Image (cartoon, grey):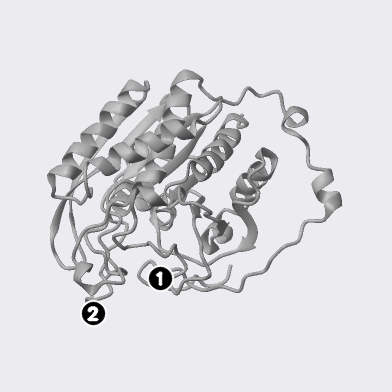
Amino acid sequence: MPQIISFMYRYLIPILITIVTVSACGQANKPSLKEESKVNIPAFNPDSAYIYTAEQVAFGPRVPNTQAHVDCGNYFVSKLKSFGATVYEQNANLKTYDGIELKAKNIIASFQPENKNRALLFAHWDTRPFSDRDPNPENYRKPIDGANDGAGSCAVLLELARQIGTQQPAIGIDLILFDAEDWGAPTFDEKNHPFSGYCLGSDFWGQNPHIRNYTARYGILLDMVSAPGARFYKEYYSKQTAPGIIKKVWEAAQICGYGQFFVDADGGGVEDDHTHVMKHRKIPCIDIIHYDPATDHNFGAYWHTQNDNMDNISRETLKAVGQTLLYVIYHEK
């Protein structure tokens, strides 16, 4: 394996993009859903996911150590319990890059907890306390709504939980909402810090899982998966450690008719929750994350700005991601 490229404060690390052209013959040989399997796959409801996104945003920025954060955490716990999940609340005091102590909460929802054959799906639920990419410097120290960067991904997991609670797949599923992911050092802070400050919740859970010696067959991280026109390239660390899972998910997207979202091309490498799960739990993980080569940071133009609001949420994108994941987990045996 080539040496892992050093992390760059969670910015995507540019990697040569190679577009893989699929021949018409190859497309013709793709099985239809009906031919591929008789598995009964639930229908992902994008309206439901949209509402879950709006409900999170309505609390206000979900920044640790605020009332909005506490209220939204209680909302998640209540929702997940109502769907029949076994819910664990993992509270932790975590230190930021500049020494602030955060009262963080990782929320874990398990279905069929007794089943040793498991898959892990996760996202972060906190929002960034800085708008350090905002075009107006006066907004730099304002927290973001985090509609796409947080809420949309969690909404997909909530809708998955609702469906799983009604119809169980053959394998056990764990859904984790990681906290304190987005309190990384802002761009306006020019001091040298010992670490980037991102992914505190997943790093803590990786070293202190809710179940002793926890493991899963694989993990799938969702990050910024709800914006209009989002495109998901194959993230570098995902390809290095879990190429089979990349293949499984991207093929499922093609079969479900969402190949335009899941681009058959390489993106960049990013420090994200999946890298910390892989580091500590040795679970092969992939990151489904919006990649935009047109911006200087390779994320959406609204990333870490005051514009990350409900205007940047698309039911079509929510459906593409959610239905693809339902296809994947309901075909596991």
Label 1 crowd bin: few (<14), some (14–19), many (20+), radius 10 Å = some
Dot 2 falls on a residue whose secondary structure is: loop
Give coordinates of residue 93: x percent, y percent. 16, 50
User: Pointer 1 and pointer 2: residues touching (CB < 8 Å)?
Assistant: no
Which numbered tag is attached to residue 7? 1
Q: Residue at x 65, y 41 (%)?
A: 252
Q: Is residue 165 above or below residue 269?
A: above
**Is residue 210 visible in this depiction of the protein?**
no
Give coordinates of residue 218: x percent, y percent. 52, 44
- Say what amino acid the circle numbered 2 marks: Asn
Tally of marks: 2
Is residue 24 toward the left or the right of residue 59 in the image?
Answer: right
Q: Earlier in the sequence, mark 1 or mark 2?
A: 1
Q: Is residue 63 above or below residue 176?
A: below
Dot 1 falls on a residue whose secondary structure is: loop
Q: Which quarter of the rendered picture does the N terminus lie within?
A: bottom right
Q: Residue at x 27, y 48 (%)?
A: 179
Is residue 161 toward the left or the right of residue 34 in the image?
Answer: left
Which numbered tag is attached to residue 164? none
Q: Look at mark 2 in the image and give the residue it sits on.
A: 192
Q: Nearer the viewer, residue 8 or 90?
A: 8
Q: Which quarter of the rendered picture does the C terminus lie within?
A: top right
- Say what amino acid the circle numbered 1 marks: Phe
Q: Is residue 127 above or below residue 37?
A: below
Q: Nearer the viewer, residue 8 or 171?
A: 8
Q: Pick out the residue farthest to the right.
A: 25
Is residue 220 toward the left or the right of residue 57 in the image?
Answer: right
Question: CA separation, marks 1 and 2?
Answer: 15 Å
Q: Residue at x 38, y 62 (%)?
A: 302
Q: Pick out the residue farthest to the front.
A: 311
